[in-house]
Image: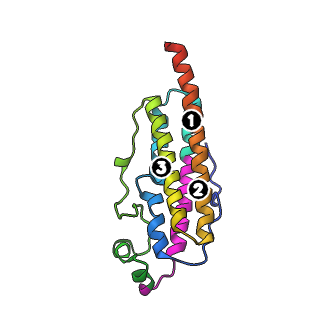
Amino acid sequence: MWMYEKRLEHPVKIKNPNPAIAKVIISQLGGPDGELGAATRYLQQRYSMPYAKVKGLLTDIGTEELAHIEMISAILYQLTRNLSICDIKKGGFDTYFVDHTTGVYPQAASGMAFSTATLQVTGDTFTDLYEDLAAEQKARLSYDNILRLVDDPDVRDPIKFLREREIVHFQRFGEANYTNLSKFTRHTG
């Protein structure tokens, strides 16, 4: 069981709303390599994982990804709060605004709504762990791309934190994969 502390994993305090930046960052909520997909993938993969330690790892990282959803949502909310219609049009946020006003809706930067079609859960230990390794690298790359596009330090700070967590998750999945590969080769080799 985990405890929800009702605070963000890392503070988000954005002073200047900016819908153009929100349009880019929204991919990390509902895009193909975003946090919603990661949380869903890991929390579903845990059910067919035969190794208790890896099942625990999937639960730990999956619930942390839920905390990342909160952070991305807080960033999006703070970037789009109190916008005038002029700000919305100028920031290119008008097409999003038509469907969602300034509500936080999971979609990719391209406008494609979140879909579980971007997830994979096979029930095979190695296939799922390799999927997870790739997912963490793709999320890290998305954060790298956001950092290339965003110069606001209030936005960059939590994005850098999230990027670092993707690296840690990649390392932990790599360790789990290596440990299970060793067990597998001992039993079959």
The amino acid at mark 3 is Lys
Q: Nearer the viewer, residue 66 or 5?
A: 66
User: Residue 162: which numbered mark, if any?
Assistant: 2
Going by the picture, which residue comes out furthest to the front? Answer: 148
> Marks 3 and 1: in contact by CB < 8 Å?
no
Q: Nearer the viewer, residue 2 or 110?
A: 110
Q: Which residue is mark 3?
A: 138
Q: Main secondary structure of the magenta part?
A: helix
Side of 17 where 92 appears, left or right: left
Q: Residue at x 56, y 47 (%)?
A: 63
Q: Which residue is mark 1?
A: 174
Secondary structure, mark 2, is: helix
Residue 47 position, x and y percent, is 47, 34
Q: Residue at x 58, y 56 (%)?
A: 162
Residue 109 position, x and y percent, is 40, 64
Magenta stretch, residue numbers: 63-86
